[in-house]
Amino acid sequence: MEDPDYVEKVVEVFCNKLPFDIISAGAAADCDFGDKNFKYYAMLESILTNFGRVPVGREPELAAAAVQCPSGRVRRQGVAVLEVWVENTGVPLKELLPQVHKLLTDIIADEVCNDITESINELIAGKTAFADSDC
């Protein structure tokens, strides 16, 4: 997904097809393959796989939806995208994407996975370099 025009088209298709109310329903402990909405989580995860290569801040609602997704895999991928954007710019999330920073502060108490909580806390705290910020 290196061609910006292609990325733009793919992002547009995903934004038009994904049911944001379902994919951003909030953290859940167990809802991957057996979940009736798994196909939507898989669609979001597939775009996020290369989303870190998308220009910083492009379609932040996709990253915001991802960090609120019931699927832990997708939440991890959403956090990884944010880490890549922050690391690539060297700008803390609070300055880079204030609306996403606020969202993370609002949802952190509901996160059910310790590793995701730790990563979100690092973003909230203003960290700009991450050990595994490859998405």
Image (cartoon, rainbow, N blue to C red):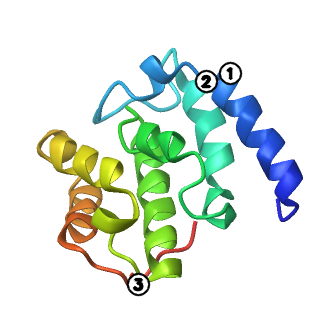
- Numbered disc 1: secondary structure: helix
Instruction: Pick the residue in front: 53 or 91.
Output: 91
The reply to whether residue 107 is in sight is: yes
> Where, by quadrant of the figure, is residue 24 drawn?
top left
Image vertical order of residue 91 relative to residue 70, above or below: below
Read off the residue under disc 3. 131
Instruction: Pick the residue in front: 107 or 90.
Output: 90
Distance Cα–Cα, label 1 vs label 2: 4 Å
- Tell me whether circle 1 and circle 2 mark residues in contact (CB < 8 Å): yes
- CA neighbours of label 2 inside 10 A, class few (<14), some (14 to 19), many (20+): some
Q: Residue at x 65, y 63 (%)?
A: 55
> Where, by quadrant of the figure, is residue 9 drawn?
top right
Q: Position of residue 30 (x, y in %)?
A: 34, 33
Read off the residue under disc 1. 17
Q: Residue at x 57, y 64 (%)?
A: 56
- Numbered disc 2: secondary structure: loop
Q: Residue at x 28, y 64 (%)?
A: 94
From the image, which quarter does the N terminus lie in? bottom right
Image vertical order of residue 84 relative to residue 4, above or below: below
Q: Report the mark closest to the observer, 3 or 1.
A: 1
Instruction: Pick the residue in front: 14 or 112.
Output: 14
- CA neighbours of label 1 inside 10 A, class few (<14), some (14 to 19), many (20+): few
> Where, by quadrant of the figure, is residue 14 drawn?
top right
Distance Cα–Cα, label 3 vs label 1: 33 Å
- CA neighbours of label 3 inside 10 A, class few (<14), some (14 to 19), many (20+): few
Read off the residue under disc 2. 18
Residue type beneath disc 2: Leu
